[in-house]
Amino acid sequence: MSPELDAFEFLSLSREQRIAKCRDMAAEAERLAGRNSGDLRASYLGLAEKWSKLADEMERLEGE
């Protein structure tokens, strides 16, 4: 999957695909953080953390 996000496409994905998309977005944000510094790096790392937490939460809810 590409690191781009389309909300309608995202909603059409299965739960597993949504989790994978979140992980892809986190990885892309981490990659971009590695190429930047200062506030921009911190912002990308913050985005990566949020994408990872969303994927974790979706996995947790799957188990319920």
Image: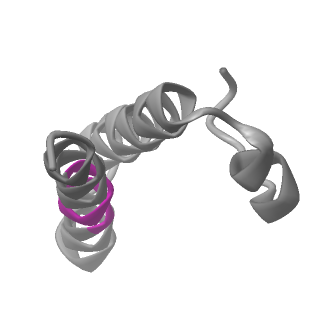
**Residue placed at 29% from the left, 59% from the top?**
54
User: Would you say 30 lies left or right of 11 here?
Assistant: left
Q: What secondary structure predominates along the stretch shown in magenta? A: helix
Q: Is residue 13 magenta?
A: no
- Looking at the picture, does residue 50 appear above or below residue 19? below
Where 22 falls versus 8 (above or below)? Answer: above
- Which is more toward the observer, 25 or 59? 59
Identified at 29% across, 51% down, the residue is 58
Q: Residue furthest front?
A: 64
Which residue is situated farthest in the top direction here?
Answer: 1
- Which range is magenta? 47-52
Q: Position of residue 20 (x, y in %)?
A: 44, 27
Q: Answer with the quarter of the image where residue 42 lies.
A: bottom left
**Residue 9 x %, y %:** 83, 47
Q: Residue at x 46, y 27 (%)?
A: 16
Residue 36 location in percent, x, y?
A: 32, 52
Q: Could you say which is closer to the camera, residue 43 or residue 56?
A: 56
Left/right of residue 57 with respect to residue 23 in the rendered view: left
Residue in the foreground of this view, choosing between 28 and 6: 6
Q: Residue at x 71, y 49 (%)?
A: 10
Q: Is residue 42 left or right of residue 2?
A: left
